[in-house]
């Protein structure tokens, strides 16, 4: 079952562990992939690791929308990274999808699923190209840790346990 708007209306910290076990679905026009999410990280506008920390820009504008949109950006000029916008309209927050079954690493999964900036702003509730599904699986057994690759952030934000992962489907 495709996830609805109520699911995405939660804060990023609440949404991140709930995404574990959900299916990331991508239709490429010839084939539909459905892979189980096993690693996420959350980001909020009051967090120095968040792209929207310094305010709204053309790059981050979708993060200010209500939850349920795709925020995709290019990292290091090489990898597209997929984030799921969370919460209500006006406050920027999103959840980075770091891994799915068979593809660990946010750049590897987007490359495998042909996810790039053309899908920036995609409405995950209405889209036929990119969406999330719930097939009833619940990832009860998950762990929390510090986020990865945010050395530029203030120490208090680097210390947050905002990475969520399950070793099932890794």
Image: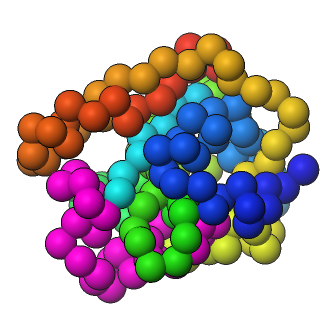
Is 82 situated above or below 90? above
Nearer the observer, 59 or 55: 55
- Residue at horizontal 57 percent and vertical 35 percent from the top: 17
- Residue at horizontal 34 percent and vertical 30 percent from the top: 161
Whether residue 67 is visible, yes or no, is yes
Nearer the observer, 84 or 17: 17
In the rendered view, does 25 fall on the left or right side of 141? Answer: right
- Residue at horizontal 40 percent and vertical 32 percent from the top: 163
Classified by dominant secondary structure, the portion drawn in magenta counts as loop
Whether residue 103 is visible, yes or no, is no
Q: Position of residue 123 (x, y in %)?
A: 67, 74
Is 58 situated above or below 41? below
In the rendered view, does 118 fall on the left or right side of 27? Answer: left
- Residue at horizontal 51 percent and vertical 25 percent from the top: 165
Q: Which quadrant holds the C terminus? A: top right
Q: How is the image coloured?
A: rainbow
Nearer the observer, 14 or 110: 14
Locate residue 107: give its quadrant: top left
In the rendered view, does 132 fall on the left or right side of 101? Answer: right
Indicate whether residue 159 is drawn in magenta. no
Indicate whether residue 61 is drawn in magenta. yes
Locate residue 141: give its quadrant: top right
Magenta-colored span:
45-71
Q: Position of residue 66 (x, y in %)?
A: 57, 74
Q: Position of residue 80 (x, y in %)?
A: 41, 57
Locate residue 112: give its quadrant: top right
């Amino acid at each position: 079952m495709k996830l609805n708007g109520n699911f995405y209306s939660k804060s990023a910290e609440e949404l991140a562990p709930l995404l574990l076990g959900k299916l990331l679905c991508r239709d490429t026009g010839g084939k539909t992939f459905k892979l189980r999410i096993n690693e996420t990280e959350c980001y909020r506008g009051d967090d120095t690791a968040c792209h929207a920390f310094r305010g709204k820009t053309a790059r981050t504008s979708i993060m200010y929308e209500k939850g349920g949109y795709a925020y995709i950006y290019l990292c290091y000029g090489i990898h597209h990274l997929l984030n799921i916008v969370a919460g209500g309209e006006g406050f920027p927050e999103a959840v980075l999808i770091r891994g799915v079954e068979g593809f660990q690493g946010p750049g590897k999964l987007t490359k495998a699923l042909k996810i790039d900036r053309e899908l920036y702003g995609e409405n995950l509730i209405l889209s036929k190209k990119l969406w999330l599904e719930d097939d009833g699986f619940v990832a009860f057994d998950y762990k929390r840790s510090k986020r990865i690759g945010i050395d530029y952030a203030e120490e208090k934000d680097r210390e947050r346990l905002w990475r969520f992962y399950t070793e099932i489907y890794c």
